[in-house]
Image (cartoon, rainbow, N blue to C red):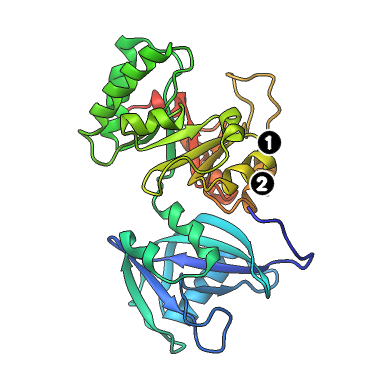
Amino acid sequence: MRLRRTAQPALHVVAAVLQRGRQVLLTRRQPGTHLAGCWEFPGGKVQPAEPREVALARELDEELGVQVLSARPLIRVVHDYEQLSVDLDVWRVLQFDGDPVGREGQALRWVDLSDLGEVAMPDADRPVLKALRLPGRYTISTPHYEPACFWPALERCLARGDLLQLRLPGLPQTEFVAVARRALAMAREHSAARVLLNAEPALATELGADGVHLSSARLWRTLRRPLPADRLLAASCHDVLDVQRAAALGADFAVLGPVLATRSHPGAVSLGWSGFESIVLASGIPVYALGGVGPEHASRAGRAGAQGIAAISALWDAGE
């Protein structure tokens, strides 16, 4: 997260992720424009008082000649360049009609998801690449280890291809290591599943986990990104300072909450959706909503700028 250098309002821009399988459409900025020559997600300026969805549909029609049939928010990033600040409002277009063409003379290019990191793109677009690699749900394991219930539930989550945090704070270290080894071995049987350990980064690296999830306390003890770029780094956050810290460390995503009242932390002060949104808007990284939320809140979380929802019981205990 970067501190704003100007009191001027950021330029509100909508951008679209259009996909065909693993291919993502990019357009090239025209000569004489800001960041000329860079490849970016197609879109343009939101007009005063224009609804975001209307702006998205209008821009894609004007720029590409396609009609948006269905879309949902993906991520919103406020970024300061030297010349201006941009509020990049990115949507994933789920369905569209028409074949994209450069109606304004701009070059078009379909790029595989795995190759996007090699393309020259504006800095504001970089967090979008992280969001594209993440699902809309982040499952957190039950903190209570009861083997008869734990392993069947884990198998269900892995079979769904979940992104999952293994968090067992009550286990002694030696027992946690044994559980983590078995869980990671199970995850290798499900290629789509990824498991992050809520543990010291060194242990996650030693065991070959897909990444590490830092508690808020561990987040503030960590001085630099502890994992290579091919491993996921996540962090638990409760306020704007935590999210700033996670972004500064190069976290791939954060979990922010509690958003709503929750039975597990009855005395905690909840952020509410407006408080959550105000933090997420300037975060610069994907953020999951946590606390009192479940799959039924996915749409509301998306409107607040969330990557998706994170939960224990609502996802860990869920069926297929």
Q: In which quarter of the image is residue 77?
A: bottom right
Amino acid type shown at disc 2:
Ile
Name the secondary structure under disc 1. loop
User: Which dot, 2 or 1, sits closer to the camera?
Assistant: 2
**Residue in the image at 43% along x and 44% along y:** 136
Image coordinates of residue 133 in percent, x first then y, are 39, 51
**Residue in the image at 68% along x and 41% along y:** 241
Of residues 176 and 307, the one drawn nearer to the viewer in this rendering: 176
Image coordinates of residue 151 in percent, x first then y, are 29, 18
Image coordinates of residue 252 in percent, x first then y, are 48, 47
Q: In this view, does 136 lie above or below 99?
A: above
Q: In 3D space, how far apart are the residues under numbered discs 2 and 1 (Cα atoms)?
A: 10 Å
Q: Earlier in the sequence, mark 2 or mark 1?
A: 1
Amino acid type shown at disc 1:
Leu
On the image, numbered disc 1 is attached to which residue? 271
Q: In this view, does 44 lie above or below 71?
A: below
Of residues 313 and 169, the one drawn nearer to the viewer in this rendering: 169
Q: Which mark is residue 279?
A: 2
**Residue in the image at 28% along x and 19% along y:** 152
Q: In this view, does 211 lie to the left or right of 31?
A: left
Q: In this view, does 211 lie above or below 198?
A: below
Q: Is residue 2 left or right of residue 8?
A: left
Q: Residues within 10 Å of mark 2 (few under 14, many from 20)?
A: many
Q: In this view, does 9 lie to the left or right of 111?
A: right
Q: Are marks 2 and 1 in contact (CB under 8 Å)?
A: yes
